Amino acid sequence: MEAEGPAGFPRHVAIIMDGNGRWATERGLPRVRGHHHGVEAVRRVARAARDMGLQYLTLYSFSTENWSRPQSEVGELFSLLRTFIRRDLAELHAANVRVRIIGERAGLPPDIGPLLVEAEERTARNTGQNLIIAFNYGARGEIASAARHFARLAAAGRLDPDAIDPALFETALDTYGIPDPDLVIRTSGEQRLSNFLLWQCAYSELIFVEKYWPDFRESDLAAAIEQFGRRKRRFGAVVEMVGSGSAYS
């Protein structure tokens, strides 16, 4: 568990980008138009996060549960991913951003996998901001996959089950090597994690924003980070009150 940056500034912010479809529906537009505007919000917020000096930004773009949406909408989401990588990868690379993709690769359209690999390999040596895209991601599936990994090792006699602790378990998660989110932001007013980084968010601060994702602006990110800076993070420990000699939990 790593602390946030200086003066309460988060090292890692994760965003559940919710509300694209409702944004479009309320304007009498097809739901896919909301996703198009959502991509513009991704570009806007990613640039703002870099300008602020945020080291890690994770965006929840497509969950394993999203396959249940209409086929036309799912197809459009894949099309937007293709366009984003082809159009924005050069800019991200030039900005020294390292791109990482977490989520299940099996079952994706055949051209998507190579695009994801290209994005990761082209930016692998970049040393600036880390942009993590959670695509076809589900936290329960991620945890179950890690459990199966260690179960196979134990069944083969290559691992003592008693040796499995949280630090070892994390090595089999998609996010291994990435610090846990200090702050999770969800747009659209919904107040739940929706199968997002359940292991990693054990001690994350949560902020819920009423705006739909296409309306999320740089100022909203700054306001959330400012609110984060006012919170007291104790990670289950007792904190001494300065000058009083007392403690509170």
Image (cartoon, rainbow, N blue to C red):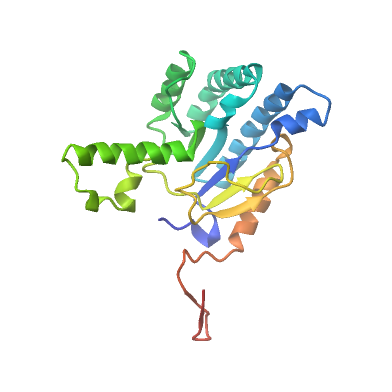
In which image quadrant can residue 74 be found?
top right
Residue 239 as seen in the image, left or right of residue 16: left
**151 vs 164, nearest the viewer:** 151
Res 82 visible: yes
Q: Quadrant of residue 34?
A: top right
**Residue lying farthest top?**
110
Residue located 30% across and 53% down the image: 165
| Residue 119 appears left or right of 37 | left
List x then y, in percent, for residue 81: 56, 22
Q: Residue furthest bottom?
A: 244
The image position of residue 154, as x and y in percent, is 21, 42
Q: Position of residue 127 (x, y in %)?
A: 41, 38
Which residue corresponds to the image point at 68% horizontal and 26% vertical from the top-left? Answer: 35
Q: Determine whether, in the image, residue 14 is placed left or right of residue 98.
A: right
Looking at the picture, does residue 8 appear above or below residue 140? Answer: below
Choose between 67 and 213: the one closer to the eye: 67
Q: Which residue in the rendered view is the most extreme toward the left? A: 157
Residue at 41% x, 34% y: name it.
Answer: 126
Closer to the camera, 113 or 47? 113
Residue under the point 54% across and 18% down: 86
Name the image quarter holding the N terminus. bottom left
> Residue 89 at x, y = what percent?
51, 24
